[in-house]
Image: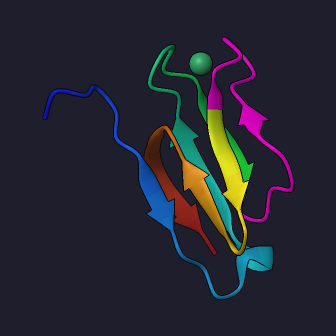
Amino acid sequence: MNRVFFTLVIFMREPDSKFIKVRCGKCKNEQIVFGKAASVVNCLVCGKPIAQPTGGKIKVDARVLEVLE
Ligand SMILES: [Zn+2]
């Protein structure tokens, strides 16, 4: 692997009920991302885009630590 962090596309049948705990690949900030984000979510610390909505799923561009039910 030549990337510090990885890109993960999460498929969720019920995205309403999901929160994802992620760690920014740039500054290591840990942040909770709503699974049904309607717009791009940026890191609260460094501003790096860490999640973007793609229809019924969310594309996370950060380290996924945990998926919360
Ligand atoms: Zn960051």
From the viewer's side, name the closer residue of 30 and 50: 50
Q: Residue at x 51, y 67 (%)?
A: 10
Q: Is residue 15 above or below residue 7?
A: below
Can you give x and y, in whole percent of width and height, for residue 21 in the image? 58, 49
| 19 on left or right of 64 | right
Residue at screen point 66% across, 29% down = 49
| Front position in the image: 44 or 13 | 13
Q: Which residues are magenta?
A: 35-49
Q: Quadrant of the N terminus?
A: top left
Quadrant (top left/top right/bottom left/bottom right) for the C terminus: bottom right
Q: Is residue 15 above or below residue 27?
A: below
Q: Position of residue 61 (x, y in %)?
A: 51, 40
Q: Where is ligand 1, by quadrant?
A: top right
Image-quadrant location for residue 18: bottom right
The colour scheme applied to this rendered structure is rainbow
Return the x and y of residue 36 as percentages of the image width and height: 78, 65
Residue 51 vs residue 28, the one in the foreground: 51
